[in-house]
Image (cartoon, rainbow, N blue to C red):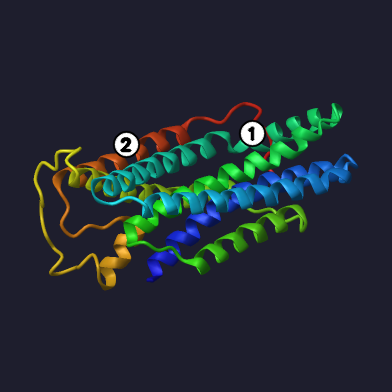
């Protein structure tokens, strides 16, 4: 396992755990402010249940990929990579658009649940928020492991999760101001590069079973100089989806994706802010 696998695992887990931890932190802070600490146990229990459900989803996905061979294996790996690239892209754009509204939206839902004594809502709100992030993490890590040779970094995940929880603790318990919008945008750019690599890998897998025309294959072969399975080449493959002998279709997919999403994201960020944006946490 190389440093790129650690870095990629760290980044994905950090980003997803940060989003989930922020939501749980917002819920607990509001409950404390409204003197409704009796619901803390509901939040903690549903959060733990969501984590267990995410781990279960991970085992299911692992079993699914290990039980297939031949073309079906390539198909599943290709689909997982393409879906992961799509969800990663959606996640970055969604957070850039909705980041300012997350706190107010969650607070409104919690206040509504409290006014109605809706125990089910108090359980389901943190559960689905955490499970969504957990399921996304499982999908992303599985796609990354397929691209990088079948492994992710345990310690990269632990460090990513630990840093995310620590940042949220500093915000809600320590009263520290951390530029979350800048943090999300900077990590979002790295996430998009990872997504581009997953997209190209998914195209490669579907080329191998004949579902996509490879056009020119290979368009070049620099593996004798920078082998994708050794040293720096394996590092670049795990982190950015490097391929020493890609097809023209893969190259077009990779760069077209990066150019299009970069332009769209920049246009979104260049738009003037709303007149009265909701205050972030």
Location of residue 227 with respect to 199 vertically, above or below:
below
Counting from the top left corner in percent of width and height, residue 52 is at 62, 52
Q: Residues within 10 Å of mark 1 (few under 14, many from 20)?
A: some
- Let me know if residue 116 appears in the view: yes
Query: Residue 243: x, y in percent?
Result: 22, 57
Report the side of 18 relative to 176 (left or right).
Answer: left
Let me know if residue 179 appears in the view: no
> Residue drawn at (10%, 49%), measured in percent from left and top?
217
Position of residue 54 relative to residue 5, above or below, is above
Extreme-bottom residue of the structure: 231
The residue that mark 1 highlights is 101
Residue at (35% x, 46% y) in the render: 81
Q: Quadrant of residue 145?
A: bottom left
Query: Which mark, by number, is residue 17?
Result: none
Q: Position of residue 132 (x, y in %)?
A: 57, 42
Q: Quick one: 93 or 76, which is closer to the camera?
A: 76
Image quarter where the C terminus lies is top right
Q: Nearer the viewer, residue 136 or 17?
A: 136
Percent of width and height locating residue 39: 84, 43
Picture residue at 27% right of the left edge, 48% below the top: 74
**Tag 2's secondary structure?**
helix
- Please state if 136 lies on the left or on the right of 177 as rendered: left
- Kindly give the residue lying farthest to the front in the view shown: 67
Indicate whether 65 appears above or below 225: above
Number of residues whose C-alpha sits closer than 10 Å to that of mark 2, classed few (under 14), some (14–19) or many (20 or more): few
Task: Answer with mark 1 or mark 2, whichever residue precedes in sequence.
Answer: 1
Q: How many marks?
A: 2
Left/right placement of residue 6 relative to residue 37 reads left
Q: Which residue is mark 2?
A: 260
The residue tagged with tag 1: helix, strand or loop? helix
């Amino acid at each position: 396992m190389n440093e790129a696998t650690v870095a990629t695992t760290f980044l994905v887990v950090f980003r997803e755990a940060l989003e989930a931890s922020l939501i749980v932190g917002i819920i607990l802070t509001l409950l404390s402010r409204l003197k409704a600490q009796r619901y803390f146990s509901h939040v903690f229990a549903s959060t733990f249940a969501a984590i267990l459900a995410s781990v279960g989803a991970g085992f299911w996905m692992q079993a699914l990929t290990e039980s297939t061979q031949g073309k079906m294996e390539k198909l599943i790996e290709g689909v997982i990579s393409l879906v992961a690239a799509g969800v990663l892209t959606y996640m970055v754009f969604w957070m850039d658009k909705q980041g300012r509204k997350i706190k107010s939206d969650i607070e409104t839902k919690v206040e509504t649940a409290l006014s109605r004594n809706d125990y089910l809502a108090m359980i389901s709100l943190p559960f689905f928020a955490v499970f969504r992030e957990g399921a996304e993490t499982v999908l992303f890590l599985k796609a990354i492991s397929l691209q990088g040779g079948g492994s992710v970094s345990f310690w990269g995940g632990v460090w990513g999760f630990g840093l995310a929880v620590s940042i949220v603790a500093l915000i809600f318990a320590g009263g520290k101001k951390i530029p979350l919008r800048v943090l999300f945008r900077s990590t979002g750019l790295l996430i998009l590069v990872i997504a581009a690599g997953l997209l190209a890998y998914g195209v490669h897998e579907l080329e191998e079973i004949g579902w996509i025309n490879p056009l020119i294959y290979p368009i070049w072969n620099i593996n004798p100089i920078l082998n994708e399975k050794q040293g720096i080449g394996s590092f670049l493959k795990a982190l950015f989806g490097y391929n020493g002998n890609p097809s023209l279709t893969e190259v077009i997919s990779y760069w077209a994706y990066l150019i299009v999403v970069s332009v769209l994201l920049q246009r979104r960020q260049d738009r003037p802010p709303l007149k009265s944006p909701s205050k972030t946490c």
